[in-house]
Amino acid sequence: MESLATEILGLNIQELTDLVANLGEPAYRARQLFQGVYKDRIRSLEELSTFPKFLRERMKQEGISLSTPVIDKKFVSTDGTIRYLIAFPDGQSVETVWMPEGDGGETGDGSDAGDEEESHSGLPKKTYDRATICVSSQVGCAVNCQFCMTALLGLKRNLSAGEIVGQITTVLNDHSVDLDKKRINIVFMGQGEPFNNYDNFIKAVRLLVEGVGFPQSRMTVSTSGIVPRIYDLGKEDVRPKLAISLNASNDVERTKLIPINKKWDIASLVDAAKVFPLRNRERMTFEYVLLDQENDSPQNAREVVQIIRGLGDKQASAKVNLIAWNSGPEIPFNTPSDSRVHAFQKVLTDAGIPTFIRRPRGRDIYAACGQLKRTTA
Ligand code: SF4
C-alpha cells in the first residue's frame, strides 16, 4: 500500500473520500471526518469521537494527521480587538485578527445598515452578537504596497487551504463561538494578497462555506488589483464579496503606492469591475487608504468620483470605504486629520457615492489595516 502521509486539515470531501477508500473504509467515514474537522472544529484526531479508537490508531500509523495551527501569542487592544500570532509546524507564523462588535456595531468589513439581514417582519434582525475575523492568505506579501508593514516582510510562502481555514477555526475555538448564535464575518485582508495564492484561497472559501458553515455573503476578499483573478472570482459559484483596494485616484500616484499598477492600471481594474457579476443586493467595495497630503486632497476625491462613475451600471452597487492610514515604524507617511478625512468623504457623498469611514481597530497593538508584520512587542 502506498504511503498515506497526509494532513487532513484542508482536504475537501472528495479528497477525504479518496483517503478513507485507501484505508478500505466506507464512504460515510469521509462525511464523519468532514463534519468533525470543519463543523465540529476538532483539534486532534483523538477528538474524533465518531471514529473507533482502532481506526484513529491506524490512521496515525499510516501517517495521517490533523495539525491545527497553534496560538503563539495574543495581543489584546483597549478596544477589544485581539491580534493573534498563529504558528505553523515549519516555524512560520501569520497574524489573524479578531474584532468584536456588539449588536448594531459596524461589521468591520465596511458593511452598513443596508447589509443587515431582515427578519420576516421586514425589520433588521439584531438578535446576535457580531465579530469579524481578518485572516491571512500568505506569510508576508510580495505586492510591496508602500504604506503597508506586511510588505516589509517580503513573501515568505503561500499558506495552504488548511492553514487559512485553521486560522479561523482556531480563533473561533478560542472564543468558543457557536456559529448558530453569533454572526461572524470573515475578511481576507490580513497578511498577503489572496489572489496571488488563488487556488488555496478559493479552496479555503469552499471549506468555510460547505464545512465550517459560513454563508458566503459574510465573507469579503480584498485585492490590491490582480486583474485576471478578479475575472476568475466572478466565475466561481461559491465566493466572497469583492473589495478592490484603490488607494489612489490616478495612475501616476497608484503606481507609486502600489507598483503592480504598472501591470494592471486603474482602467483595467474598472473594466474587470464593470463585468463582475453581483448577487442580489450585493455591493462591491472600493477601499481607499488616506495618506496625509499624498492622496487625500479634494482633487483626489473628485478623481475617485470619476473612477466610480466609469463603472457604468455597476456604479449603483459600488461603495467606498475610507481608511485613515494606520501609522507604523519605517513607513514614511502620516495619518490625515479627521477634517481632511471628512472633507474627502463629503466630495464622494455629495456625488451620490455611499462612502464610509472605517473605524481603526487595534491600532495600539499593530492589528489595524496595513500593520500586520508579526510585531511581537
Ligand atoms: S496592502 Fe495587502 S497587498 Fe499590499 S503589501 Fe500589504 S498585504 Fe500585500
Image (spheres, rainbow, N blue to C red):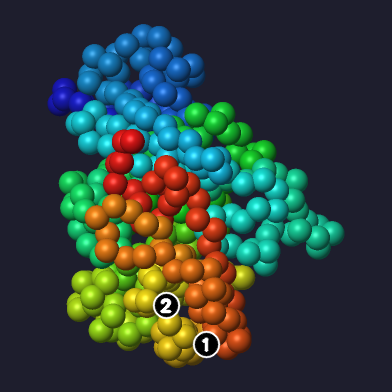
- Disc 2 crowd rating (10 Å Cα; few below 14, some 14-19, many 20+) is many
Q: Which mark is residue 313?
A: 1
Q: Which residue is mark 2?
A: 296
Which residue shows up at 53% across the image and 62% down it? Answer: 358
Q: Is residue 30 above or below residue 368?
A: above
Which residue shows up at 49% across the image and 16% down it? Answer: 49
Provide the secondary structure element on which disc 1 rests. Answer: helix
Q: Is residue 113 above or below residue 105?
A: below
Q: Which mark is residue 168?
A: none
Which residue shows up at 53% across the image and 45% down it? Answer: 99
The residue sitting at the right extreme is: 121
In this rendering, position of residue 67 left or right of residue 322: left
Tell me where residue 349 appears, x and y as whole percent.
Answer: 59, 82
Tell me where residue 165 appears, x and y as whole percent.
Answer: 39, 41
Question: Identity of the amino acid at label 2?
Answer: Asp
- Disc 1 crowd rating (10 Å Cα; few below 14, some 14-19, many 20+) is few
Q: Is residue 39 above or below residue 120?
A: above
Residue 347 visible in this rendered orientation of the protein: yes
Label located before the other in sequence (1 or 2): 2
In this rendering, position of residue 156 left or right of residue 97: left
Q: How many angstroms separate mark 1 from mark 2 (CA)?
A: 27 Å
Tell me where residue 244 appears, x and y as whole percent.
Answer: 40, 70
Tell me where residue 300 appears, x and y as whole percent.
Answer: 41, 84
